[in-house]
């Protein structure tokens, strides 16, 4: 059978709050003069009451003194506990899957209930947990069974269908006292051997173990109830073979800018092997034992991604401020704010001052750059929700990275930003379109059965399209043939809006040949379009033309301005796509604007790297990253920002891009209508 009720401990079971706990304990212990207590000793007390923990670390037994220390701890926890507590990587996914199976989810902890509610509200929708029992809800803390029995009573559960999960010996004793099945989680400092000494149903390395087992056998028959994984489904093997061969061809034969098939193959391989095996059970278990150290390292890396760089603890040594002479304890002088680590200037200080002079860079720029590479979603969430002292401001960083990008373009591809190169590129595109039009007309001429008429048509077309038919090229040739001059005159007068039949009559009169009606030439007439009307309007007003040219030149060289234009579209689209309460944290439109600014900084940073790798700049693209690459970056950021799966992040990103495209089309229609109304009036 499966359990219908799961009651979890909080600290070191669902979330890693060790950093916040250590900071709070360290604050109290420093005030009380206990400076020799190590972080490891503090972590060993997690799960116990505050009074018992302080008594164990300091040897103090006076109840009034312990109550005072507890009060100091609670006051300091109000400022730093939530910001320094993060869910384990698998917590949200496992709880949501248990919830989808109809299970009831509850939390039992010695931590205050209001603190837990504050923490879970950041990552879960309201009402996700069926019950939260905190320290203020019971008279006796764990290992007393009072809290566990209270939770089962409120949930209407029985010991037979309830599973209690925790990380410490205190949790095991609590379950034993309440006669409730217990499963250990090795997230904390308690070892497997310590937990195995108490009655248990299973001991897992992480919460994923709940999804891989059924927990159907009694503990008397199976102490570590771990169901062997099933074989890989046979129908997945041909899919893997096809994707693998395509990825190999992509790598060896047709390597492109973005290895799409390689990424799809790796994702499919992970999806196929997740929770499955392709080897006999004995070999599979041996391989998993060999890979266990690697899994622990990866899990540690995931935790590092979530937590980021550790906040430095206040030093307990007394320091004389070199600025104002104040004697203080801590990292910064309370009088003038100067750091206690002020030293003599070195080369690193000189480089930092030079960079600050060029770009107005202050502290946090380097750390923000590094975090944008491997933990952008967590960085964005921390900054927007209030943890801003350690990070660089997004819009200022956007302009700095845009300036660095332009500098790198000047070094790597100096001709990329030249206007004449852009003009040459547009000329080449126009000539390509002219060549395509000539091929279409030539095909129509070849279908003409009258040889005389076909010859005349060929002569006219050759006259008009000589030297690719481009007007500047026609004038540069200076060709004096009468037929050529007539064709040039017709080509120049075609801008007056003559239709196809009039053009044919004009050709007959000026060239001196029978009337020919090359109807395909009517495609060349497009001067009545809104764009050409706007160009003629600008050309007829010198001041407006100078303003337009100035704006075009400035926009062409200012990548940051172009990026800023896209931010409101993406902000509105993201706000619409993630509007449901289950996506936490919930940002308003302004906060989403800051979110998109950081993502734009990340894209510019990746563009700089791609520019250095490729050795040339793509002036027609907003970023140097391909469209699949941009989608992948958005998926990566949204997955970290909202704590959702890759699949959910991918579909939400697609919906966001589609919404942004629809908004852009709607905006273009509105602006086009306004411009057309002005020009036609």
Image (cartoon, helix red, strand yellow):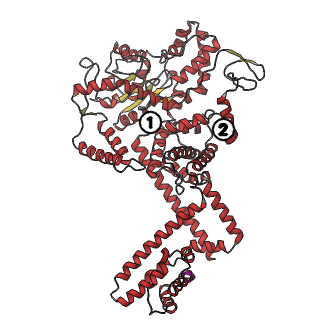
- Left or right of residue 545: residue 295: left
- Left or right of residue 132: residue 209: left
Q: Residue 534: horizontal and vertical position, in percent? A: 61, 72
Instruction: Give the structural element (helix, strand or loop) at label 2.
Output: helix
Screen quadrant of the N terminus: top left
The residue nearer to you, when weighing 553 against 446, is 446
Q: Residue at x 30, y 30 (%)?
A: 212
Residue 556 is drawn in which quadrant?
bottom right
Residue 128 image label: 1
The residue nearer to you, when weighing 120 against 84, is 84
For marks 2 and 1, the one nearer the N-term is 1
The residue nearer to you, when weighing 226 against 323, is 323
Residue 147 is drawn in which quadrant?
top left
Screen quadrant of the C terminus: bottom right
Q: Residue 335: horizontal and vertical position, in percent? A: 76, 24
Asked whether residue 494 is drawn in magenta, I would say yes
Q: Which residue lies furthest to the right in this view?
A: 324
Q: Are circles 2 and 1 on residues that touch, CB within 8 Å?
A: no
Residue 436 is drawn in which quadrant?
bottom left
Position of residue 72 relative to residue 645, above or below, is above
Q: Residue 319: horizontal and vertical position, in percent? A: 71, 17
Considering the whole magenta stretch, tell me its main secondary structure: helix
Mark 2 surroundings within 10 Å by alpha-carbon count, few (fewer than 14), some (14 through 19), many (20 or more): few
Please identify, in this view, whether the residue under mark 2 or under mark 1 is nearer the observer: 2
- Left or right of residue 412: residue 8: left
Q: Residue 529: horizontal and vertical position, in percent? A: 55, 75
Residue behind mark 2:
355
The residue nearer to you, when weighing 153 against 430, is 430
Task: Please indicate, yes or no, whether residue 153 appears anywhere in the rendered image.
Answer: no
Q: What stretch is highlighted in magenta?
A: 491-495
Asked whether residue 519 is drawn in magenta, I would say no
């Amino acid at each position: 059978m499966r359990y219908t009720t799961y009651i979890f401990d909080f600290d070191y079971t669902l979330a890693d709050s060790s950093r916040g706990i250590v900071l709070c304990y360290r604050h109290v212990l420093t005030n009380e003069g206990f400076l020799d207590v190590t972080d490891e000793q503090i972590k060993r007390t997690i799960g116990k009451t505050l009074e018992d923990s302080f008594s164990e670390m300091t040897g103090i037994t006076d109840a009034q003194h312990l109550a005072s220390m507890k009060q100091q701890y609670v006051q300091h926890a109000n400022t730093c506990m939530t910001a320094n507590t993060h869910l384990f990587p698998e917590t949200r996914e496992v709880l949501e899957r248990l919830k989808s199976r109809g299970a009831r989810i509850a939390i039992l902890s010695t931590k205050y209930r209001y603190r837990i509610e504050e923490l879970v509200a950041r990552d879960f929708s309201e009402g996700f947990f069926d019950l939260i029992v905190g320290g203020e809800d019971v008279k006796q803390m764990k290992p007393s069974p009072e809290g566990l029995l209270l939770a089962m009573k409120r949930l209407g559960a029985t010991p037979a269908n309830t599973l209690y999960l925790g990380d410490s010996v205190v949790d095991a004793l609590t379950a034993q006292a309440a006669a409730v099945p217990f499963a250990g989680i090795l997230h904390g400092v308690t070892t497997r051997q310590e937990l195995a000494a108490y009655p248990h149903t299973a001991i897992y390395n992480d919460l994923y173990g709940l999804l891989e087992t059924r927990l159907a056998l009694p503990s008397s028959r199976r102490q570590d109830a771990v169901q062997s994984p099933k074989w890989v489904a046979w129908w997945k093997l041909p899919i893997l073979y096809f994707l693998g061969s395509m990825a190999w061809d992509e790598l060896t034969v047709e390597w492109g800018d973005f290895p799409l098939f390689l990424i799809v193959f790796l994702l499919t391989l992970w999806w196929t092997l997740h929770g499955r095996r392709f080897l006999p059970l004995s070999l599979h278990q041996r391989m998993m034992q060999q890979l266990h150290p690697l899994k622990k390292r990866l899990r540690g890396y995931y935790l590092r991604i979530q937590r980021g760089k550790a906040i430095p603890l206040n030093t307990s040594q007394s320091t004389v401020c070199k600025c104002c002479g104040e004697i203080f304890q801590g990292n910064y002088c309370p009088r003038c704010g100067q750091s206690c680590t002020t030293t003599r200037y070195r080369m690193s200080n000189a480089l930092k001052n030079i960079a600050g002079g060029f770009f107005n860079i202050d502290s946090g720029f380097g750390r923000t750059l590094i975090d944008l590479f491997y933990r952008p979603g967590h960085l964005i969430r921390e900054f927007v929700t209030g943890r801003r002292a350690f990070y660089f401001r997004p819009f200022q960083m956007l302009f700095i990275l845009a300036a660095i990008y332009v500098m790198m373009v000047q070094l790597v591809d100096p001709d990329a930003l030249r206007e004449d190169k852009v003009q040459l590129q547009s000329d080449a595109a126009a000539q390509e379109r002219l060549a395509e039009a000539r091929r279409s007309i030539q095909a129509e001429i070849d279908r003409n059965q009258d040889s005389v008429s076909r010859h005349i048509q060929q002569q006219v077309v050759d006259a008009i399209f000589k030297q690719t038919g481009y007007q500047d090229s026609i004038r540069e040739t200076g060709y004096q043939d009468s037929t050529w001059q007539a064709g040039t005159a017709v080509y120049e007068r075609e801008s007056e809006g003559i239709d196809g039949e009039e053009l044919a009559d004009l050709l007959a009169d000026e060239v001196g040949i029978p009337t020919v009606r090359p109807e395909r030439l009517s495609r060349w007439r497009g001067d009545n379009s809104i764009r050409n009307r706007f160009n003629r309007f600008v050309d007829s007003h010198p001041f407006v033309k100078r303003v337009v040219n100035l704006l075009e030149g400035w926009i062409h060289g200012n990548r940051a301005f172009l990026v800023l234009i896209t931010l409101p579209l993406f902000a509105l689209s993201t706000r619409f796509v993630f509007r449901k309460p289950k996506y936490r944290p919930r940002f308003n439109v302004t906060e989403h604007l800051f979110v998109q600014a950081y993502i734009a900084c990340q894209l510019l940073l990746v563009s700089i790297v791609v520019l250095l790798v490729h050795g040339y700049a793509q002036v027609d693209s907003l970023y140097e990253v391909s469209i699949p690459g941009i989608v992948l970056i958005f998926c990566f950021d949204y997955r970290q920002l909202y704590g959702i799966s890759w699949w959910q992040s991918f579909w939400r990103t697609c919906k966001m891009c589609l919404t942004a495209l629809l908004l852009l089309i709607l905006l273009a229609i509105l602006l086009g209508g306004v411009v057309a109304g002005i020009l036609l009036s």
